[in-house]
Image: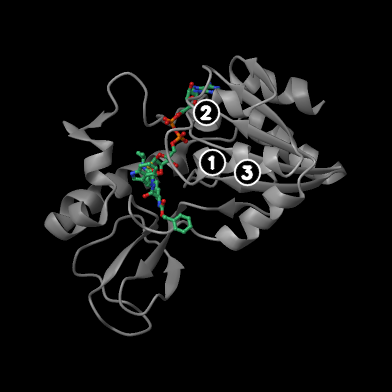
């Protein structure tokens, strides 16, 4: 059986990392949607870099939880494609052999001019130079609103081929990920949602188990 899993911020919530659409969804009085955009970076790059420095430090201090570890066990015995919207590396640190980061990664920097990617330093500065082209055009390797998510060809193929699609801890508000269940379902996959609250695209799932990921994911895997 081929399984495609999509994870969102909810799977890392019990590792202490804030979700996006929880209670206030604010950072220093800014809406997340106003920080995670190319326009915000053009307007105030220092502010956006500080936001990602803070997120990078929080992710480095966090530990994988029972849900991340259960998905690593699942990969050992199944044909699994693990796609995450998360920019932390908790799946990797839990032992998942391959993780597709569709919204980028906090621990990578990239060059807006030449596309070169490299490991991000703990803090990034507006004046950082690209090690490949030497231009001061570095940015976090993060997919902001209005940008094209990464690895999409591979993801559509995995959704197309899946017998089972499972979405874990994602609110179903952000596209294209919010359309994955519909796409997989139309191609014959059984669709299961594991979430704290039903997502905005709940109608696209055949089954749903509500509760904290550290309980629902190990229960489902084992
Ligand atoms: C628990 C739990 C626990 C809590 N256990 N569960 C109008 C219509 C359709 C589309 C658009 C539109 N206008 C604009 C668009 C496109 C836009 C979009 O979708 N906007 C919407 C807001 C409408 N999308 C884009 O721009 C994307 N690009 C794009 O579409 O390009 C076109 C294209 C696509 C494909 C091929 C070719 C071209 C880019 C989107 C980039 C998203 N970036 C962000 C920020 C960057 C990363 C970062 O800083 O971390 O990614 S936004 C933010 O939302 C982040 C997340 O990855 C993403 C999803 O959030 P997620 O993971 O769902 O988190 P929450 O907080 O929303 O939900 C948490 C869930 O967990 C909840 O359900 C809780 O109940 C649950 N939970 N605790 C289990 N313990």
Question: Given contact means CB atoms under 8 Å apart, are the residues at marks 1 and 2 in contact?
Answer: yes
> Which numbered disc covers residue 179?
1
Q: Residue furthest front?
A: 186
Query: Counting residues from the N terminus, which is met first, the one under dot 2 or under dot 3?
Result: 3
Left or right: 143 with respect to 164?
Answer: left
* Residue depicted at 28% across the width and 83% down the height: 134
> Which numbered disc covers residue 201?
2
Question: Given contact means CB atoms under 8 Å apart, are the residues at marks 2 and 3 in contact?
Answer: no
Query: How far is the residue under mark 2 from the one under mark 3?
Result: 12 Å
Residue closer to the observer: 39 or 160: 160
**Is 72 situated above or below 192?**
below
Question: Given contact means CB atoms under 8 Å apart, are the residues at marks 3 and 1 in contact?
Answer: yes
Q: Can residue 66 be seen in this view?
A: no
Q: What element carries label 1?
A: helix
Q: Residue 141: x percent and y percent? A: 40, 60
**Residue marked by disc 3:** 183
Name the quarter showing ligand 1.
top left
Residue closer to the observer: 155 or 218: 155
* Residue depicted at 58% across the width and 17% down the height: 212
**Is 43 situated above or below 119?**
above
Query: Counting residues from the N terminus, which is met first, the one under dot 1 or under dot 2?
Result: 1
Query: How far is the residue under mark 1 from the one under mark 2?
Result: 8 Å
**Is 132 situated above or below 68?**
below
Q: Quadrant of residue 112?
A: bottom left
Query: How far is the residue under mark 3 from the one under mark 1?
Result: 6 Å
Q: Which residue lies furthest to the bottom in this view?
A: 133
Q: Residue 133: x percent and y percent? A: 33, 85
């Amino acid at each position: 059986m081929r399984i495609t899993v999509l994870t969102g911020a909810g799977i890392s919530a019990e590792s202490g990392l804030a979700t996006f659409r929880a209670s206030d969804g604010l950072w220093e009085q800014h809406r997340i949607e106003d920080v995670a955009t190319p326009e915000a970076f053009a307007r105030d790059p220092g502010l956006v870099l500080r936001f990602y420095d803070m997120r990078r430090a929080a992710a480095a201090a966090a530990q994988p939880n029972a849900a991340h570890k259960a998905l690593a066990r699942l990969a050992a015995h199944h044909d699994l494609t693990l796609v995450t919207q998360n920019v932390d590396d908790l799946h990797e640190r839990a032992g998942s052999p391959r993780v597709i980061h569709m919204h980028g990664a906090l621990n990578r920097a990239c060059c807006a001019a030449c596309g070169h990617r490299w490991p991000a330093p703990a803090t990034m500065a507006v004046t950082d130079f690209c090690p490949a082209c030497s231009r001061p055009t570095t940015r976090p390797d993060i997919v902001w609103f209005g940008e094209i998510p990464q690895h999409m060809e591979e993801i559509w193929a995995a959704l197309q081929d899946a017998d089972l699609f499972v979405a874990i801890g994602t609110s179903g508000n952000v596209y294209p990920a919010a359309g994955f269940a519909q796409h997989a379902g139309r191609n014959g996959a059984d669709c299961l949602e594991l979430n704290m609250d039903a997502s905005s695209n709940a109608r696209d799932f055949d089954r749903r188990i509500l509760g904290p990921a550290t309980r629902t994911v190990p229960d489902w895997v084992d």
